[in-house]
C-alpha cells in the first residue's frame, strides 16, 4: 500500500522526525480499517481551506500561521496524505479586512472545501462565522483570540472550533501575574476593533473578579500615531501598569509614548506584545513588556526543536516572526487530520467532521500541547489556562519571564 511504502522509504532516508513517522503509522492503521470495510478513497485531492491576512498590516502573524498549516500538510502528504489522497490547501488572503474575509469565506464554500483553518483577526473572523455555520463546514481558528468567536452559537450546534488561547483565559492570566507583582492600578488602552472591544471586556471582567476597577480606560482607532494625551491622563489617574489590547504597531506607539514621557511603568497584555510590530517597532521602549504565550520559540523539548528546525529549513528563515501563530496553525492541521481519520465510514460531510472533532480520537502529541481530546460537544476551545506561560521582551526577543516556566515547558501540557 502507498502509505506503508512511503513510511518505509522516508524512515530509511532519515528525512522525517520520529513524530511524523508515528503519524504515518496512524495513517497506515486507518488505511487498514478502511480495507476491512470499504475501499480507501483515492484520486481527487482532499480540499482544506486556509484563510488569513497574508498581505497587509497583519501579515506578520498571518504568514507564519499559513506556513505552519502548510508545513503540517506537506508532512502528512509525504507519508501518504489522507488515506492515499493528497491534501490540497485552498489558500485565501483576507487582508485583515472583514469585508474581504467574508468574500473569501464564501469562495471557500463555493470551492467545496471539507473544512477550513483560519483567521487571525477577531473582527474579520466575526463577520464570516455565519458562512461556515450556515453551510455546516467546520472552521478551526488557529490565531484569533476574541472570546465571542466560539461563543456565538450554542456549543452543541457550533461548527466553530479554536486552537488559540481565547482572551477570556489570557486576560485573567495576565491580571493574576501583575497583581502578584504588586501592580494593581491598571490603565487599559484598547483599540476600537472587535479584538479591542472583546479584550477590554475580558480585562475588566478579570479585574472585577479581584474586586478591582481600572483607574483609566481609553479607546483608539487603528493607525493612531500619538497617544501622549491619553498616557498623561493615565499617569495622572495613578496607574502603575498599562494593559494594552491592540494588534498592530499601536502597541509600539504606547511604548514609545511612555518612554518619551519618562513614565517608567510596565506594559502588559495578550499575545500581540510578542509581535515584531511591537518588539521591533518599540525597540528599547518595548523591553520588559510582559504577555501571555502558548509557545515560545525555544527548543525546550524534542517536539518543539523538531518543529522549529523544520520550519527554519522549509521557509529559509532564522526567526519566525510570530511563533505562536505558526505553532497553533500547525497543531490545528494535525488535529483536523486526526479527526478525519477518526471517521470510519468515509463520510466527510461537515456534520461528520464536526462530530469527529468533538469525540476522542487518537492522542495527538502537538507542538503547543498534548491533545487527548481538544474539543467536545460543549467545548470548542482546545487550550486551557494551564497551557499559558508568561513571556517577556528581553533585548529585542521574547523569552520566558520566569525560569520556572522554562523548566515546566520541558513537559508539554494537557488540557485541564
Image: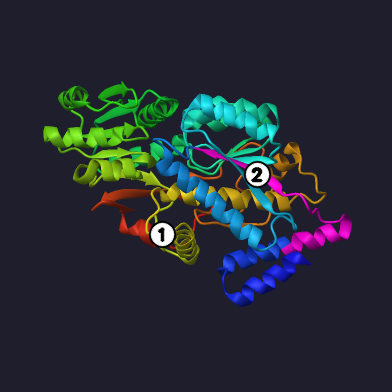
Query: Which colour scheme appears in the figure?
Result: rainbow
Magenta segment includes 30? yes
- Cβ–Cβ below 8 Å for labels 1 and 2? no
Q: Residue 92's quadrant in the figure? A: top right
As drawn, 183 above or below 304: above
Disc number at residue 408? 1
Disc number at residue 191? none
The percent position of residue 283, horizontal first and vertical second, equals 22, 45
Magenta segment includes 287? no
Q: Is residue 112 visible?
A: yes
Residue located farthest toward the bottom when viewing the structure as drawn? 12
The secondary structure type at the circle numbered 1 is helix
Who is closer to the viewer here, 280 or 358? 280
Q: Residue at x 60, y 75 (%)?
A: 13
Who is closer to the viewer here, 57 or 302? 57
Who is closer to the viewer here, 291 or 348? 348
Circle 2 packing at 10 Å, graded few (<14), some (14-19), many (20+), is: many
Give the magenta part as a residue range.
28-52
Q: Is residue 52 left or right of residue 204?
A: right
Disc number at residue 48? 2
Q: Residue at x 52, y 43 (%)?
A: 142
Nearer to us of marks 1 and 2 is: 2
Who is closer to the viewer here, 212 or 311? 311
Circle 1 packing at 10 Å, graded few (<14), some (14-19), many (20+), is: few
Amino acid at each position: 500500500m502507498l502509505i506503508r511504502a512511503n513510511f518505509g522509504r522516508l524512515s530509511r532516508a532519515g528525512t522525517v522526525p520520529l513524530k511524523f513517522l508515528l503519524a504515518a503509522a496512524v495513517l497506515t492503521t486507518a488505511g487498514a480499517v478502511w480495507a476491512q470495510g470499504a475501499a480507501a478513497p483515492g484520486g481527487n485531492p482532499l480540499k482544506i481551506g486556509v484563510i488569513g491576512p497574508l498581505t497587509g498590516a497583519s501579515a506578520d502573524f498571518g504568514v507564519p500561521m499559513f506556513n505552519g498549516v502548510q508545513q503540517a500538510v506537506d508532512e502528512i502528504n509525504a507519508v501518504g496524505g489522507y488515506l492515499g489522497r493528497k491534501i490540497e490547501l485552498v489558500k485565501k488572503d483576507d487582508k485583515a479586512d472583514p469585508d474581504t474575509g467574508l468574500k473569501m469565506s464564501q469562495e471557500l464554500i463555493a470551492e467545496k472545501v471539507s473544512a477550513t483553518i483560519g483567521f487571525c483577526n477577531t473582527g474579520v473572523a466575526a463577520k464570516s462565522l455565519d458562512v461556515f455555520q450556515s453551510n455546516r463546514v467546520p472552521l478551526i481558528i488557529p490565531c484569533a483570540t476574541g472570546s465571542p468567536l466560539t461563543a456565538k452559537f450554542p456549543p452543541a450546534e457550533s461548527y466553530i472550533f479554536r486552537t488559540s488561547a481565547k482572551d477570556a483565559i489570557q486576560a485573567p492570566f495576565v491580571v493574576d501575574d501583575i497583581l502578584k507583582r504588586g501592580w494593581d492600578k491598571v490603565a487599559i488602552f484598547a483599540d476600537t476593533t472587535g479584538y479591542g472591544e472583546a479584550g477590554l471586556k475580558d480585562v475588566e471582567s478579570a479585574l472585577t473578579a479581584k474586586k478591582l476597577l481600572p483607574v483609566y480606560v481609553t479607546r483608539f482607532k487603528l493607525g493612531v500615531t500619538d497617544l501622549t494625551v491619553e498616557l498623561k491622563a493615565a499617569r495622572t489617574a495613578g496607574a502603575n501598569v498599562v494593559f494594552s489590547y491592540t494588534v498592530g504597531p499601536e502597541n509600539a506607539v504606547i511604548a514609545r509614548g511612555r518612554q518619551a514621557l519618562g513614565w517608567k511603568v510596565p506594559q502588559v497584555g495578550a499575545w500581540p506584545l510578542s509581535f515584531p510590530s511591537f518588539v521591533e517597532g518599540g525597540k528599547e521602549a518595548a523591553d520588559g513588556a510582559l504577555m501571555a504565550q502558548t509557545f515560545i520559540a525555544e527548543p525546550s523539548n524534542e517536539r518543539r526543536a523538531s518543529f522549529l528546525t523544520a520550519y527554519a529549513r522549509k521557509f529559509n528563515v532564522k526567526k519566525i516572526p510570530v511563533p505562536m501563530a505558526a505553532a497553533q496553525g500547525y497543531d490545528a492541521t494535525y488535529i483536523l487530520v486526526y479527526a478525519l481519520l477518526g471517521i470510519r465510514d468515509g463520510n466527510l460531510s461537515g456534520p461528520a467532521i464536526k462530530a469527529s472533532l468533538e469525540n476522542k480520537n487518537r492522542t495527538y502529541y502537538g507542538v503547543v500541547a498534548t491533545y487527548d481530546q481538544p474539543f467536545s460537544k460543549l467545548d470548542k476551545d482546545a487550550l486551557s489556562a494551564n497551557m499559558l506561560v508568561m513571556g517577556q521582551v528581553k533585548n529585542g526577543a521574547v523569552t520566558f519571564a520566569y525560569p520556572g516556566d522554562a523548566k515546566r515547558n520541558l513537559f508539554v501540557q494537557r488540557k485541564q
